[in-house]
Image (tube, rainbow, N blue to C red):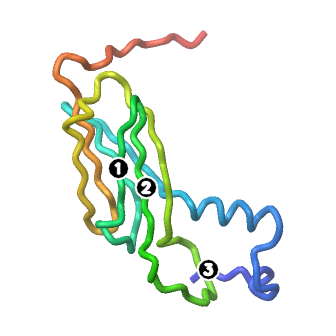
Amino acid sequence: MYHNHAHAAKGNYGGRNRHLFLRSMERAAINIYKTDNSYEMLVFAPGRIKEHFHLDVKGAELTVSYSPPEDFPQFNWVSREYSRGGFKRTVTLDETINTAAITAKYLDGVLQVSLPVIPGKEVATQEIQVS
């Protein structure tokens, strides 16, 4: 178990560190991996309610957001290393993604977003030599 005694005694996380801590809690970590026919985006979002996720594609941007319900319980936290609150993340999609076929499911605290690639539109790989 992690304890930060110096900050716990003050009852806050102090100055700049507090700002960075709070800002990081407004985000959800994202991992992306490639398969033969899609990109798979994993949004780490434990303790959320799947009906409160919102995914929106506008132009070349995919926005994933979460808004907790109004009656979501607020606790008097003693220690808090992750948030179950709201967040908004935006990723840029290239022209190879079939935006009409994007799907999402929430399983075991991870929002899994599948971004299928349009067959024949895969981006060619170009190797760049380091001199």
> What's the amino acid at mark 2?
Ser
Looking at the image, tell me whether mark 3 or mark 1 is earlier in sequence order: 3
In-image side of 62 versus 28 (left or right): left
Q: How far apart, in angstroms, are the residues tagged by discs 3 and 1?
A: 34 Å
Q: Please report contact status of discs 3 and 2: CB closer than 8 Å, yes or no.
A: no
- Residue 2, which numbered label? 3
Looking at the rendered image, the disc whose residue lies closer to the viewer, 3 or 2, is 2
* Secondary structure of residue under mark 2: strand
> In which quadrant of the rendered image does the C terminus lie?
top right
Q: Whole-percent x and y of residue 74? A: 54, 85
Residue pictured at 36% horizontal, 45% vertical: 56
Q: Mark 2 highlights which residue?
A: 65
Q: Mark 1 highlights which residue?
A: 55
Q: Please report contact status of discs 1 and 2: CB closer than 8 Å, yes or no.
A: yes
* Residue 20 sits in quarter: bottom right
> What's the amino acid at mark 1?
Leu
Residue pictured at 34% horizontal, 46% vertical: 41
Mark 2 is surrounded, within 10 Å at the Cα level, by few (under 14), some (14 to 19) or many (20 or more) other residues, namely some
Q: How far apart, in angstroms, are the residues tagged by discs 3 and 2?
A: 29 Å
Q: Whole-percent x and y of residue 4? A: 71, 80
